[in-house]
Each structure stands twice: as structure tokens, then as C-alpha cells.
Image: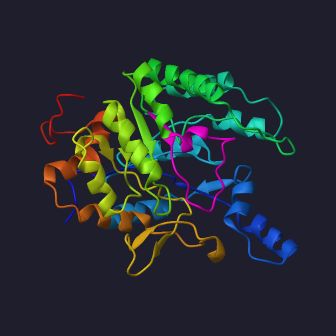
Amino acid sequence: MKLARFIIDTHVHAQRHAAGPELKKRMEKRGKQVKYADLAEIMHTLDTYDNSARLLYDMECYGVDMCLLSSAFGMDDSLNLQLVEKYPDKFRALCYPCETKKKALKGEIEWTIEAACEELERKLSTGKYIGIGEGSPARVFPEGVKPYNYTRKERMDELRKVMDVARKYQVPITTHTGSPMGYPLSNTMWPENWEPRWIHDLATEYPDVTIIFEHGGQSGGTSALLFEECVEVAANHDNVYLEGGIYWTDLYYLALRNPNVGPEKIIWGTDWGASQPVITQIGNNPQSYVMQVHKEGIVKHQIDVMGWSLRQVGRLDISQDDLNLILGGNALRIFKIDFPLTRMFKFIDWL
């Protein structure tokens, strides 16, 4: 039996990096196991390939009706669009300024937020993309150029330009939160990743733009610090949502207990396709959770995060109507995805 009437995984990467040859070179040169940091260092420059056969298998296996595809770390929006056109009932796509990023990494152009937003506008104007992500566009530096940390004002001014684009095209925008613990994420890319409370300002200034905390403050490990800050922001603003696919069951309950969050403000997104293993520690609380473990090296198989995540959601003792919102109804509403029947999901009169 499916867990909900219509299930949408809102955070999926249907592309995979062809990393094997480059990582093998590094291992031979250094004479030791390659780590997630090695992969992160080269990921932006690697070719990617269509990994949708495995994704479609998992969707069929677990009764997932639709996935929202996003690009990240060297992936290509155009490949996602090809998948949407090939499987229009299965996929929708978010967009990111991939071309601007790749040119800046090669030193062909200097990265600017204006160039990134121009690319977003070009893509959104086609009507083929339904949101902005993964994360908000962020500065990149070519090899050999030392990056520097943003000031808060610099980054917030950049984010406002992206919010202007989202407002113009009436699409949701994502902001990345948390770390899987293996890939090094620093303030030189997404400083707001570590400062969810910055989003208070954007949510207030742009009440008509939907903002989604990717990972909902929990991308890896067991710390609830960023999670609690994301819940606080979501509870203060009707236009801010939590993506809960990496939550273990108790984290869902913590968000659901807040009457200004509840099931109406949570969507399900697993980060399927990322190299983020689920580890088990018998007797711990939580007993299983997502985290990249340095000493174990890079996971080579296709991690089954979708099955694990649905089991965490399935343990929730809540009404089926509430579960229907979390697993699909909320996403249908905020991403404006057509559904063939009316009155199948609980009406939310305050959103």
C-alpha cells in the first residue's frame, strides 16, 4: 500500500558524476583512499550522465509518483529538461545558472549575480521550469583564485536579486541548509546555509515568494541546531517551508508540534542521487540517519535513501489527510502542479 494518495519527492538528482577515472588517478598518485573532499574538489568540472533508470526503478518500488529534478555541483539543467520531456507524468525541473557557473569556473567570465539571474530569467521565461534550485545561485571562483568569505550585506543583496526573479516568474526558491559531513561546505559558497535566520528578512520583504529550506536544517549527522532555527523561521512566516526528507521520525514530530508549522508547512524531498549514505548505530537515538563517514570513503552503490526516508515518515501516527499533505499535497500547491481531481487534499485557508 502506498503511504499517500500522490507522492512527490521534491529534491532529486537524476544525474550522476563520471568520477571514477579522476578519483582513480588521485588514489594512484597519493597511494591512499580518496575522500569526499577529493570528490567535492573535482565535482564541478566532471561530466554527468543520465541516471534516471535507477531513479525510475526506485520510484516504482516505493510508489513515488513524481520527482522534482534539480542540478547541483556540475550537473546540467538541459539534461533534466530532456527527462521532463521524455517522462512528463514523472518529472518536473527546477533551474540553476549552470552555464554561468561553468564558464566562471573555467575563467572564461567573471561570476556575477547579474549574469546568474539573467540565465535564470532566460530559463524561467520558457515556462519549462517550476522553481529555482538546488540552493540560491552563489559565487564561484576559477582554479587558482583564492575564494573569500561573503559579508552578510553582500550575500543578502545577491539573494534579493534572485528573489526578484522568483517574484517575477511566481516560482518557489530554495535555500540550502546543513552539511552531509563529508563534502566541505564553507562560507565562501552559501553563507546562508549556516545562518537560516537570515531568511527572516527575505521572507518579510518578499511575502509573496515561497521559500523552501532544503533539508530543513538537517542534511547529515544528528545535531538539531540548524533544524531548530529553520523551524523558528518557518513558524514566523507563512511563505517558508521545510523540506523534511532527511528527517528521522522524531524530527518530524518536533516540527509537527509547532502549530505555526504543522503538516501544512512540510514537504518531502530526499536528495536522491547524492552520495549521502544512511548509517546505523544500534541503541542510539536516532538509530539510523544520513551522514558521510570520512574513514569509510566514498559510497559507490546507489544509496537507498528513498526507502529509508519513507519508513521514517510511515512511522508517524497522524491522520492520513495530514500525511497526504506532507508527501504530495503541499508540493502540488506550492509548485502549481496540476492534479486531475479536486478536493483530494485538505484545504489550507491561511496560505
Residue placed at 17% from the left, 61% from the top?
A: 317
Task: State whether residue 265 is above or below residue 3.
Answer: above
Residue 170 position in % (x across, y down): 41, 23
Extent of the magenta region:
173-195
Q: Is residue 325 magenta?
A: no
Residue placed at 70% from the left, 33% from the top?
A: 100
Residue 84 position in % (x across, y down): 45, 43
Give left or right: position of 289 versus 183: left
Quarter-of-image position of residue 259: top left
Name the foreground residue: 36 vs 97. Answer: 36
Colouring: rainbow
Q: Which residue of the protein is positioned furthest toward the bottom in this rendering? A: 282
The quadrant in which the C terminus is found is top left
Q: Is residue 92 visible?
A: no
The quadrant in which the N terminus is found is bottom left
Give left or right: position of 322 versus 280: left
Quarter-of-image position of residue 311: bottom left
Task: State whether residue 31 is above or below residue 194.
Answer: below
Residue placed at 29% from the left, 53% from the top?
A: 254
Residue 350 position in % (x across, y down): 20, 28
Q: Is residue 174 visible?
A: yes
Quarter-of-image position of residue 296: bottom right
Name the foreground residue: 118 vs 182. Answer: 182
Q: Is residue 178 magenta?
A: yes
Task: State whether residue 292 is above or below residue 125.
Answer: below
Q: Main secondary structure of the magenta part?
A: loop
Residue 214 position in % (x across, y down): 46, 45
Give left or right: position of 195 versus 155: left
Name the foreground residue: 295 vs 314. Answer: 295
Numbered label tally: 0
